Image (cartoon, grey):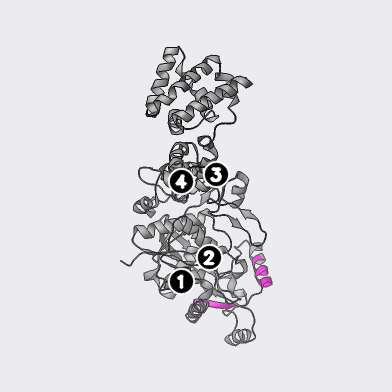
């Protein structure tokens, strides 16, 4: 069995959608699971839609999520060049081969000719396609003499090269996700293989490059499923059927409501990104947000995308890249579209944040902490992170929610004060503050038990003290585990904060 070789072949016509990232990811997981190679090939044959910067954006996006290529435009390899615009001469040779074998023909039809043909077919209740029937009434090398064709070409008259499909033939291929796909050539049209600008279309370039690069598996979005029978025919016409890759057409990523394909417009409307990185349109200057800039962990994005259309037997949800590689199989990919859930994306990020090393998080947010005028050290911040990250979805939220670990509160939650604060609570908190310095070596659990024992002695319900104590220490009604927070602040500092809170609230109450 030949070595598995897959490719991700985007067009540099704009930013990479997360659907494209998922396609790249599934290719990557399969290649690594099979011990194979992954290639990045840039399909830039449509020069009219080329967008400057898009290719580098694609590379940067895939690098960010941890996808590494064995060959490609940016790393080289034995099949270089990997940019289709640099392989132009090769495509023409293969187009000429199809012409010589009778599987393709020249077509000289103008845009007006094509429109007239379509209207006539529509009026007759037939499909408006250029096929085995309609081509015989058009201006092409099947209806013109050799001399006429030569004269037109010599005169520089624009032409395209079309595939010549048989009128009645069954095209069959096995899709690894969808099973057997059967199409009649009568339902297909003679697609253009070579354009009048001297560039190949996607169909020709894609097949030729997959053959030349020894691609064994084509894993791509289901939007390419209607083109697959044409590609199968090209493999047949070239005599490459024995090395034709296996196909797997991935389901769509759907809108949150399940109605249609997820688009940038959905993200703009509902407030979530659909691109991996921020993208600035070079023409309009419009900026589209990215997952990276919103604070998502790349591991979380990978995890989220992997489960859009794929699952394990035990329905487990949290994976790192290595685990995904180990478990991935094409057989577990669904045929049906997968609804995108922005809240689920946040959940994935939260889960991966919980699993992330506290020290690494602390190092990444330290600049933000210092920018707030705080003086601290990495060891202390690491402990703060350990308490706060349970309560946030993103790293950047930690810096906003942890300031009370570095500064005494300047205000106190008014709702807690109104509902839970009274003279008995204030008196108890002062007494508890007096006892705290003697508990410096005690654990958080021991401090909690000491407080509850003191409350019983004073005839105070311990439950009524928890929120007032939390507000006295942090100013806020919610946060990390109360006594873990107190322990990290230090008993002396905690005592000082409690007394300050009692004085402040007594004056303002």
Crowd band around label 3 with a 10 angstrom C-alpha radius: few (<14), some (14–19), many (20+): some
Disc nearer the start of the sequence (2/3): 2
| In the image, residue 354 above or below residue 431 | below
Q: Are marks 4 and 3 in contact (CB under 8 Å)?
A: no
Residue 225: x %, y % from top left: 49, 59
The residues bearing labels 4 and 1 have C-alpha atoms spaced at a distance of 43 Å
Q: Is there any visible trace of residue 119 in the rendered image?
A: yes
Q: The magenta stretch spans which residues? A: 98-118
| In the image, residue 63 above or below residue 482 | below
Disc nearer the start of the sequence (4/2): 2
Q: Which residue is mark 2?
A: 188
The residues bearing labels 2 and 1 have C-alpha atoms spaced at a distance of 23 Å
Q: Secondary structure at mark 3?
A: loop
Disc nearer the start of the sequence (3/1): 1
Q: Secondary structure at mark 1?
A: helix
Crowd band around label 1 with a 10 angstrom C-alpha radius: few (<14), some (14–19), many (20+): some
Disc nearer the start of the sequence (4/1): 1
Closer to us: 346 or 225 = 346
Given this view, does label 2 or label 1 mark the residue nearer the observer? 1
Q: Which residue is mark 3?
A: 256
Q: Which mark is residue 361?
A: 4
- In terms of image quadrants, where is residue 216? bottom left
Q: Are marks 4 and 1 in contact (CB under 8 Å)?
A: no
Residue pictured at 37% horizontal, 46% vertical: 312
Crowd band around label 4 with a 10 angstrom C-alpha radius: few (<14), some (14–19), many (20+): some
The residues bearing labels 3 and 1 have C-alpha atoms spaced at a distance of 36 Å
């Amino acid at each position: 069995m030949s070595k598995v070789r897959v490719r991700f072949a985007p067009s540099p016509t704009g930013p990479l959608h997360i659907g494209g990232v998922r396609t790249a990811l599934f290719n990557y997981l399969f290649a690594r699971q099979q011990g194979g190679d992954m290639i990045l090939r840039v399909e830039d044959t449509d020069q009219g839609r080329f967008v400057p910067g898009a290719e580098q954006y694609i590379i940067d996006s895939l690098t960010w999520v941890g996808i590494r290529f064995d060959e490609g435009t940016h790393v080289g390899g034995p099949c270089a060049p990997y940019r289709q615009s640099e392989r132009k001469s090769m495509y023409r040779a293969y187009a000429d081969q199809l012409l010589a074998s009778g599987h393709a023909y020249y077509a000289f039809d103008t845009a007006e000719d094509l429109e007239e043909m379509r209207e006539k077919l529509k009026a007759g209740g037939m499909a408006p396609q250029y096929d085995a029937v309609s081509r015989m009434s058009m201006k092409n090398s099947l209806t013109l003499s050799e001399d006429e064709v030569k004269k037109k070409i010599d005169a520089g008259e624009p032409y395209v090269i079309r595939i010549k499909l048989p009128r009645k033939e069954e095209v069959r291929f096995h899709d690894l996700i969808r099973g057997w796909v059967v199409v009649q050539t009568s339902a297909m049209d003679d697609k253009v293989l070579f354009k009048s600008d001297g560039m190949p279309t996607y169909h020709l370039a894609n097949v030729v490059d997959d053959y030349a690069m020894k691609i064994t598996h084509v894993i791509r979005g289901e939007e390419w499923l209607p083109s697959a029978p044409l590609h199968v025919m090209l493999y047949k016409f070239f005599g490459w059927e024995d090395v034709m890759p296996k196909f797997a057409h991935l389901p769509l990523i759907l809108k949150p409501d399940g109605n249609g394909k997820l688009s940038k417009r959905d993200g703009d409307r509902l407030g979530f990104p659909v691109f991996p990185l921020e993208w600035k349109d070079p023409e309009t200057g419009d900026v589209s947000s990215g997952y990276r800039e919103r604070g998502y962990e790349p591991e979380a994005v990978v995890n989220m995308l992997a489960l859009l259309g794929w699952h394990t037997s035990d329905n487990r949800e949290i994976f790192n890249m290595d685990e995904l590689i180990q478990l991935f199989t094409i057989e577990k990919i669904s045929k049906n579209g997968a609804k995108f859930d922005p809240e689920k994306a946040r959940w994935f990020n939260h889960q991966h944040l919980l699993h992330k090393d506290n020290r690494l998080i602390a190092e990444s947010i330290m600049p933000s902490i210092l920018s707030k005028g705080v003086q601290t050290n990495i060891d202390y911040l690491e402990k703060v992170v350990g308490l706060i990250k349970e309560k946030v979805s993103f790293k950047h939220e930690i810096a906003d929610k942890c300031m009370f670990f570095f500064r005494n509160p300047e205000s106190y939650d008014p709702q807690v004060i109104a509902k839970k604060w009274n003279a008995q609570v204030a008196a108890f908190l002062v007494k508890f503050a007096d006892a705290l310095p003697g508990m410096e070596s005690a654990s958080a659990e021991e401090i909690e038990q000491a407080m509850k024992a003191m409350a019983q002695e004073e005839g105070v319900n311990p439950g009524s003290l928890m929120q007032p104590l939390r507000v006295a220490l942090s100013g806020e009604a919610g946060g990390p585990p109360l006594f873990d927070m107190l322990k990290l602040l230090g008993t002396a500092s905690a005592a000082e904060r409690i007394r300050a809170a009692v004085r402040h609230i007594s004056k303002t109450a």
